[in-house]
Every structure is written in C-alpha cells, then in structure tokens.
Image: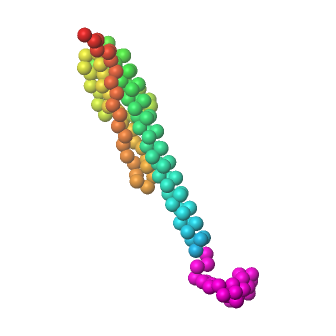
Amino acid sequence: MTNGAGAVARKREAAEGGVVRAGERGGATVLGCIALTALIALTLMVAQIGVVVVARHRVQAAADLGALAAAGALTAGVDAGCAEGERVLRHMEIRMRTCEVDGWAALMIAEGDVPIGLFGQRTVHAVARAGPVAEEE
C-alpha cells in the first residue's frame, strides 16, 4: 500500500463524504492509448490510399507517353509503333498489357504493381489512346 499524495487525497475525499473508486484510476490513460492507436491506424490507412493514387497516376502517365510514342512511330509499321510504346513503358518501369493500332491511332493498356502494406501487392491499370483527331463533318 502506498502512502503518497494519492492516498492522502483519497482519505481527504472520503472524509468529506465523497466516493472514491480506486478501480477507475488510470482509465483516462487507457482511453488515451486506444484513441492514439486509432489515430495512428487511420493515418496509415490514408497514407496507403495516397500511395495507390500516386501509383495510378504514374501508370496513367506512362500509358499516355507510351501511346504517344507508339502513334508517333506508326510510320515504320504497327510492330515498330508498339515496340516503341513498350520501350517507353519499360523505361518508366511499367508493363505493357496490350497495344492495339487502328489506322494511325494507338491504344495502350499499361499496368504496374503497387505495394499496400499488410495487404500485399496490387496491380493498377491505365488506358491511353493517341492519334489524329477525327474531323467534324
């Protein structure tokens, strides 16, 4: 048993007719720890969402540049155009899923992996088209 300031305060409160509940001592500390843990978990979740959004934008930018490169190289043929688009994607460390050519337009589908902490690794996809604009009639 302790005879510190806490014991003196409890004796004084009991003498004044107050009720002292020794079982509630430290309850605010426990609630504070729980609240802090929840705040840290929420912060980590928001950070992971940010990582996925940034990865998605990276893959979209790579798909856009790959489609532009493919469309620009179509003068050398369909295979050369798609190879140039894939070269751009590889340089940005993104994989080409498909490359389709329709006339002078190139359609590029790209994908990249994004690690999301305890949930492993997921794949994000992006589609881009580059080519001449259709004329209005």
Q: x, y percentage for residue 115?
A: 43, 47
42 displayed left or right of 90: right
44 displayed left or right of 130: right
* Residue 74 in sight from this viewpoint: no
Q: Quadrant of the C terminus?
A: top left
Q: x, y percentage for residue 25?
A: 61, 78
Q: Is residue 46 above or below residue 81?
A: below
Indicate whether residue 7 is drawn in magenta: yes
28 displayed left or right of 59: right
Q: x, y percentage for residue 78?
A: 28, 19
Find residue 133 and report its image quarter.
top left
Is 68 in front, or is 41? Answer: 41
* Residue 37 in sight from this viewpoint: yes
Q: Is residue 73 above or below residue 10?
A: above
Name, please, the residue furthest toward the top. Answer: 137
Find residue 8 and report its image quarter.
bottom right
**Image point (36%, 43%), residue name:** 123
Q: x, y percentage for residue 102?
A: 25, 20
Task: Give the magenta-colored segment's residue range.
Answer: 1-26
